[in-house]
Image (cartoon, rainbow, N blue to C red):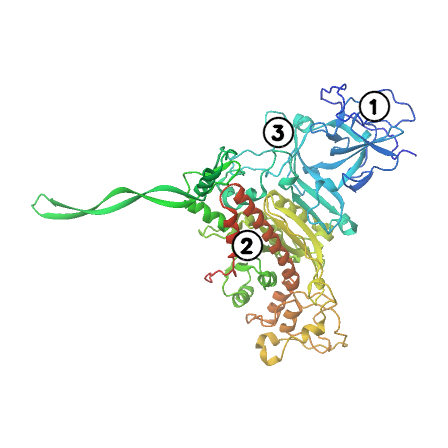
Amino acid sequence: MAPLFKSTNGRSRSTTFDIDLCESSDDEDEPEIDLTGEDSDEEVQPDAGILPRGKAANMGLSVASPPPPGYHFVRSVVTSMGTKITLDPGQRDVELTDEDFVRVKRIMSHRNGEVLLRGTLFRRAYLMDRMLRKAPNEVCAILMDVDPSLENPALGDHLVDMPLQCVCIRRTIILTNMPFAGYYSHSARKWSDHSFRDDCMPVDIAKDDGVLCCRWKRIQYKGAAGERGHCGALLKLRQRETDLEKGIPDAALVYWWRKVEVTGKGPSALPNGVSVDLTFDSDEEHGEGRRAKRRSQAHSVRTVEKTIVEDVETVSTDAFGNKAVHHTKRSEVASETEFIRGLTPRSGPKRKLAASKSDGQTIAEFEALISEPRTHFDLLAGGGGATTGAEEAGSVITFLLDKSLDACKTLRLAFPRARILHKVLGDFLHARDGRSYQVITAHISYPCKTYSPAHTAEVGTCQHDYENEDSACSVNDIFKKTRPKIVTFEQTDAMVGYKKNYHVWRRLVRDITSAEYSVRWRIMDATEHGNASKRNRLIILTACPGHPLPDFPPPRPGPKTTIRQILARVGPLRDMEEHTRSHTIKDEPPYDDNTTLRYTITCGGGAGDLHPGGKRSFLIQELAMLAGFPRLRRFARASMTALREIIGNAVPVGLARDLYRMVHRGLDQGEKEMGRWSVEVGALSEEDVRRVRERRGPETIGLSVD
């Protein structure tokens, strides 16, 4: 069989490792290949070839995949430069001559001497198309040729085969889910950045020989859409994917982001107020002794000091002989015994609450973490298309923000229990009004007119172009002010489909990942989710540190919704408000309404704003229902142009509804993880978690309207 790779001239770097080449393999049955001897002209030259970045012999392989024909598995190999590569930790991470890296999972040898290394591919973060922050020794795992149906593909299921001649030197890669900490102030670092590098090592030496750290994995899906970047993902590593003792529970990261990060403290495997007691239940305990100890764990006794205040009457005389009676309060301390629930697990290391926080406070805090109301904030809400879908999926609409007065009036009618904020986004983010805007989910629809295919003029020539571009730079400020677990974005598909917008797209993703949020994106067709109006939108899903990232909803089964079906639900004219009956007269040929709308509903109505009869445009009420709004949705009185703009800018409601159903599934999974962690650290018992989740009823929240 001919070799898979031909020898080519390339560069190599001398190794800086002191390797004992006499070390024997752990598995005597598998041979060790030594390529340090002289090479004949017919043999493959190790370290001589170089593959283009991102190219490999085979992709999408798993550890269990068989070797290519003619190859067999071996335990170790030694390159011509004397670098020994094995499957053992510390000897399996290598750098390639194109500055990529591989963690070797399998070594395969051909009978002609050619060797393939199968493993996970890594690339430096600053080479990831500017989608990750620039850090010299940060790398990202690359998973190529991934099935789009996989929500969170595993590192071990998408390996690549690389020829041995691509290996340069051996390196050390650490996989962790700890966030990359920045500076919380310009003067001092608040906590360790967990970059696993020697701060005393010069940058150029650290780049060549320092420890590398991986916190991310880049997903490239199969098909043309994945290759073009129209769908993809950048996911933070989960704890199960990290190296031994290099990760912390995912729920601990959620707790840190929601409760602790604002204080400048770093993540911890244990929550605030919980410390570790390294005492264990003895296995020698028997009978009544063990049962008594378990009862004491369920209910412990503590003494609480209470202050008793008494009035004391004092009579005084001033210099003129006048008497005055003064009442003062005298305090004394009394003790009272009460029973509290024990917070220590029944086996394993015990955790106990620190004295700074009472047991009741901790129980209430953790019960709230696993049963928080699904509050929702829609920024730049417009007519409330995404908000309507989120509400129908079960979210509690809490805050709505838009700079348009007509849009805010409509939102006030549609969501009377929410707080409507008629503000510019920048003014809201920089305001210090003392209120808490923390929510569970948020949606952001940045103005898309600047990035639309119809926007052919140079950016800056049209009104609000620079304002729209600047608004896309507000991701970090929004995340820090609202602290959401999951955030959704909606944007025109031209954001990733047109080269002129790519710099904005990369900056948006980089801002999301710099906030330690995982991100997944895909272009979706609204007609596949119950909307009669055709509209392709770029949908972006993000999740906070440690929280599981939900997947996109699958298309609805069955035939698509038609114009005829929507118009049949509109109802008589007498049931409509006067301004929702507005329309324009037209004279066009009629068309078949037993299909979806051929054109997208735009801010001005567009070519799709034509009734099947051809003699008029759609009524405002009909346009709203074609966009997915319910029949009883009320719109504030405004001009026909303003109402068309509100409807044309709205996120398709059916798409938003299906999307947020998946979001709520992700929230359910996150609450289960939080419950398990609460039990592990001893903050709650399993009975507490089960009780809290069972009593969770319909979620309502009362808020005044500004």
Q: CA distance from mark 1 to mark 3?
A: 32 Å
Residue located farthest toward the left when viewing the structure as drawn: 321
Q: Give the residue at x 75% y 36%.
A: 119
Q: Give the residue at x 58% y 41%.
A: 249
Query: 362 or 455, which is in the foreground?
Result: 362
Query: 516 or 300, which is in the foreground?
Result: 300
Examine the rendered structure and indicate whether residue 535 appears above or below residue 303: below
Q: CA distance from mark 2 to mark 1?
A: 63 Å
Q: Position of residue 302 (x, y in %)?
A: 37, 41
User: What SS does tag 3 mark?
Assistant: loop
Q: Residues within 10 Å of mark 2 (few under 14, many from 20)?
A: some
Q: Residues within 10 Å of mark 3 (few under 14, many from 20)?
A: some
Q: Amino acid at mark 3?
A: Arg
Q: Amino acid at mark 2?
A: Leu
264 with respect to 65 (left or right): left
Q: Give the residue at x 45% y 53%.
A: 435
Q: Is residue 429 visible?
A: yes
Image quadrant where residue 516 sits: top right
Quadrant for the N terminus, please: top right
Which numbered disc covers residue 35? 1
Q: Would you name the residue on which mark 2 appears?
A: 425
Tell me which numbered mark, 2 or 1, is placed earlier along the sequence.
Answer: 1
Tell me which numbered mark, 1 or 3, is placed earlier along the sequence.
Answer: 1
Which numbered disc covers residue 666? none
Q: Would you name the residue on which mark 3 appears?
A: 197
Q: Amino acid at mark 1?
A: Leu
Q: Nearer the viewer, mark 2 or mark 3?
A: 3
